Amino acid sequence: MEIDLRTVSIQPLRHTFDHIAARFGDKPASRYQEGTYNLQAEANFHYRPLWDSKHEIYDVTRTAVVMEDWYAFKDPRQFYYGTYTLARAKMQDIAESDFDFVESRGLLSAISDADLIKIQNVFLPLRHVAWGGNMNNSFIAAYGYGTAITQPCLYHAMDQLGIAQYITRMGLLIGDVSDLDVAKKAWLEESAWQPLRKYIEDTFVLKDWFELLVAQNFVLDGLLYPLIYQSFDSAFSAKAGPAISMLTRFQSEWFAETGKWVDSTIKIAISESGANQQLVQQWVEKYLALAIDAITPIAHLAFGPTASEVISELVEGFNQRSVKLGVKK
Amino acid sequence: MSNVFIAFQQNDESRCIVEAIVEDNPAAIVNYQPGMVKIDVPNSLVIKSSTIEEKIGRKFNLQEMQLHLITLSGYVDETDDEFRLSWPN
């Protein structure tokens, strides 16, 4: 008896969902594409919400920025739920082992008490700043339009919450719960923190979500993170060793990674039209001035007499970033 | 003139690798077979990690390619950034 073996190639009738095929052609689509494009709810909302009769529930006019296609905001990291959680789990593993290492080797005991108090003063109130970032990005995710932009904003919101938790854990490693209360009191009452608190609380009431994205993710984070997690971190570790850098590693790596997404988002909005470019430029100029005022007292807290040099370096770096993105013509 | 070729299993990641190869080697002929994709290119083929990174949206170490690789033919010249196949002689 003879058995004839042969391969039969079966072509699938369709490679992906019709709405993805309409965009990219009928070929196998990536998970990111399937989990992002054309998912924004558009139809079947017959009534306007009672709480905002000027807009539909999902409305493109909730921001002054105008886009032909709201899915143009492709995330360069291509994060959908799967890749996002994997990427963060990896970072979290590293952060966990860093915390373990610092704790088991007693690395904090090598730092003088005065320096530890400085770390507490500079870092611990930042957990309230990160919570502000969580609120603002949740707002963008809720009121923004198009999954391509709302999805990474929701991830960004979760990240900010994670950062607040890492700062808290660092505070608990250095001291105890009463130190967190002291930091909250400083955040609420100490004069150095009030300009920053004002900036954050003013952004809470912004209605234009793209303006909020510029104010929070681009301008404020774009100045605060380099100030704390780059300039202050390197100055401090040169003096007192790398223990604090290890405890804040998540934040510095996170800023480097998410910066790419923020840059690409700003760039895409600007290159869409001259009107968008002007809007973004106005917003950047407005919030840059406010943010510099807000972080200057923090820089004084961290650097003392050299604060103004540090700030001018930071602003220069930020301006270069803006020019590269085309914010200023 | 002879071809070099490389074949990958078909999956989410290798799709990005194939896309990158097609972009970097305009003469590439892509041949889809069940569960496998084979790419023929006249003379030489280059795979650049930078192009793959663009497609896949994250850092990509060229060694990761080996996870999806089925077979290849050609003289291999590998650096951190590039993987080249050719017939030098």
Image: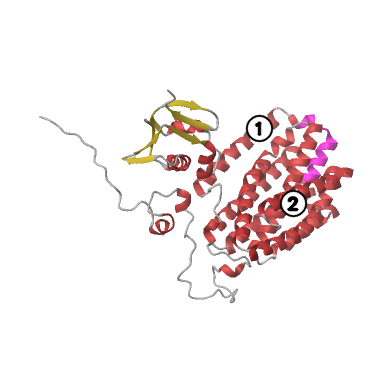
Q: Where in the figure is residue A265, as x and y percent of width and height?
A: 61, 55
Residue at the front extreme? B1
Between the C-alphas of marks 2 and 1, the distance is 38 Å
- Chain bearing tag 2 is A
Q: Residue at x 45, y 40 (%)?
A: B13
**Residue tagged 2:** A319
Q: Where in the figure is residue B85, as x and y percent of width and height?
A: 44, 29
The amino acid pointed to by label 2 is Asn
Helix, strand or loop at mark 2: helix
**Residue tagged 1:** A100
The amino acid pointed to by label 1 is Asp
**Of A68 and A54, the residue lying toward us:** A68
Magenta range: A108-129
Q: Residue at x 71, y 27 (%)?
A: A105
Q: Where in the figure is residue B89, as x and y percent of width and height?
A: 42, 22
- Give above or below for A185 relative to A254: below
Q: Residue at x 48, y 57 (%)?
A: A37
| Residue A214 seen by the camera | yes
| Residue A177 seen by the camera | no
